[in-house]
Image (cartoon, helix red, strand yellow):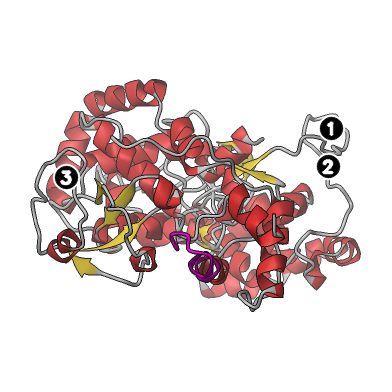
């Protein structure tokens, strides 16, 4: 389920990549915005996919990009340059060599296809004429200089137009949502939110051939083993007759359909909701809604539970507790001073949650429950999961978040993030290799630095923190 907001960024590049390790739907958002989904490479992101490791999801377009001239068909060609990852299989020479062997690579997958009971005539039919799409190599390894803040991301995804469309979808397919809720116990508003954010209700699903994309990635670049499985799974779908080749169009990483399934995710979660013998998650709303619900249910969705609560965090709070690994009951968090900003009581004090402070001490806090983790299996980015949960609440009739975001702050550019890591390393706080990508190691290093200078240890990188590291 990757490409969705694909348009956004190419959309933010999103979930799909999710289980693949990228991000597609919402990710696309990055692209679309940026460029909406998840490019869906899903290296791991689950099984659906946004395109680009979620770091790219908040990317913005380079202010002065060097763009190759479009080809006659309108698609951009490969840049012909080495990939930014530095991986040996992403050098220009390695890409050209692998592209030259593309036909042999595809043909070599026939024995594996046969073991999956794909008929030889279908293998030959579906692979005939396949050519590599080398532009994907640029998309796979792009590292945008600028990123978007969590509040900008939410503004983009949870807007009045998408809310209006979502309410229309919920009314139009009420019977299907009723049946799915009864069968799977998954909240209809969450399903509708995923549909809206992944593809803007089927209007932005991506236009690349899933077979061509996955074949390209199975034979060229740094994720060949992963995408070999995706390519063969795509062939299985076509061989079984669930979908036609023309229906399987999506993100550069292979995510397709309104909720952006990767081929392997389709195999695991797609269901025949209306009993017609096909699992059509592209053009059949009954199958689409049921399959998305089945995905969430199998990932551990807890019926009757929400995804999380906005909370106020008291002054002087120890933000070292804001950690996904530090689960406590709602009652325990209340004893530490966390409250709902509306003054309402928590309905289930015994539920366990972790504290997320996506904008640091200057922004709102959130207590995240089990269902939030389930959404993150769909797409491993917390910003994506928060957008899904919040959008679902708004579709249900809920209000915007109560507390303001620190909109005066700006996201650091990749160059600044790299500098911040280098300065943290010089001071002995960061032990990794500076790369401009912020993960747990960088956040921990930043928190320890903040503690050392008397700031809240929220791990939120701001220009002020960078200036302090510079000694200004």
**Residue for badge 3:** 181
Name the secondary structure under disc 1: loop
The reply to whether dot 2 and dot 3 touch (C-beta < 8 Å) is no
Q: Which residue is mark 1?
A: 70
Residue 119 appears anywhere in the view: no
- Asked if residue 451 is among those painted magenta in the image, a careful observer would answer yes
Q: Are marks 1 and 2 in contact (CB under 8 Å)?
A: yes
Q: Are marks 3 and 1 in contact (CB under 8 Å)?
A: no
Per the model, the C-alpha gap separating discs 2 and 3 is 45 Å
- Residue 177, given in percent of the width and then of the height, sits at 21, 37
Label 3 and label 1: CA atoms lie apart by 46 Å
Q: Pointer 2: what residue?
A: 77
Marks 1 and 2, how far apart in space? 7 Å
Q: Quadrant of residue 41?
A: bottom right
Please provide the residue range marked out in magenta.
447-457
Nearest to N terminus: mark 2 or mark 3? 2
């Amino acid at each position: 389920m990757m490409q969705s907001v694909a348009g956004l960024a190419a959309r933010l590049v999103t979930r799909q990549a999710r289980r693949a390790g990228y991000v597609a739907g919402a990710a696309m958002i990055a692209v679309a915005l940026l460029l909406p989904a998840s490019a869906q490479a899903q290296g791991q992101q689950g099984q659906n996919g946004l395109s680009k490791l979620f770091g790219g999801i908040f990317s913005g377009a380079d202010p002065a990009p060097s763009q190759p001239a479009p080809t006659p068909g309108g698609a951009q060609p490969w840049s012909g340059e080495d990939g930014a990852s530095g991986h040996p299989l992403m050098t220009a020479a390695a890409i050209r060599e692998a592209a030259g062997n593309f036909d042999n690579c595809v043909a070599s997958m026939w024995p594996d296809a046969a073991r999956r009971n794909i008929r030889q005539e279908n293998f030959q039919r579906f692979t005939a004429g396949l050519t590599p799409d080398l532009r994907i190599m640029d998309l796979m390894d792009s590292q945008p200089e600028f990123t978007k803040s969590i509040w900008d991301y939410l503004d983009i995804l949870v807007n009045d137009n998408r809310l209006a469309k979502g309410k229309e979808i919920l009314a139009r397919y009420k019977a299907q949502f009723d049946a799915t809720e009864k069968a799977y116990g998954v909240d209809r508003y969450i399903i509708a939110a995923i549909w809206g954010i992944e593809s803007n209700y089927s209007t932005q699903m991506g236009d690349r051939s899933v077979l061509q994309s996955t074949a390209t990635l199975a034979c060229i670049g740094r994720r060949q083993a992963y995408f070999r499985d995706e390519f063969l799974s795509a062939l299985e779908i076509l061989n079984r007759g669930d979908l036609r080749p023309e229906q399987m169009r999506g993100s550069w990483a292979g995510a397709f359909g309104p909720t952006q399934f990767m081929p392997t995710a389709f195999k695991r979660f797609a269901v025949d909701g209306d009993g017609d013998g096909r699992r059509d998650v592209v053009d059949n709303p009954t199958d689409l809604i049921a399959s998305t619900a089945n995905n969430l249910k199998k990932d551990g969705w807890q019926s009757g539970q929400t995804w999380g609560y906005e909370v106020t965090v008291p002054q002087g709070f120890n933000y070292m507790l804001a950690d996904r690994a530090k689960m406590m009951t709602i009652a325990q968090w209340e004893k530490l001073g966390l409250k709902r900003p509306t003054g309402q009581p928590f309905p289930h004090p015994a539920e366990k949650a972790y504290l997320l402070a996506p904008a640091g001490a200057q922004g709102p806090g959130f207590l995240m429950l089990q269902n939030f983790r389930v959404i993150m299996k769909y797409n491993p980015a917390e910003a994506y999961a928060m957008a899904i949960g919040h959008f679902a609440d708004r579709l249900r009739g809920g209000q915007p978040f109560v507390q303001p975001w620190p909109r005066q702050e700006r996201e650091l550019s990749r160059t600044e993030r790299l500098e911040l890591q280098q300065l943290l390393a010089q001071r002995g706080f960061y032990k990794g290799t500076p790369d401009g990508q912020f993960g747990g190691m960088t956040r921990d290093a930043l928190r320890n630095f903040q503690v050392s200078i008397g700031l809240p240890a929220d791990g939120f990188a701001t220009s002020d923190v960078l200036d302090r590291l510079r000694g200004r």
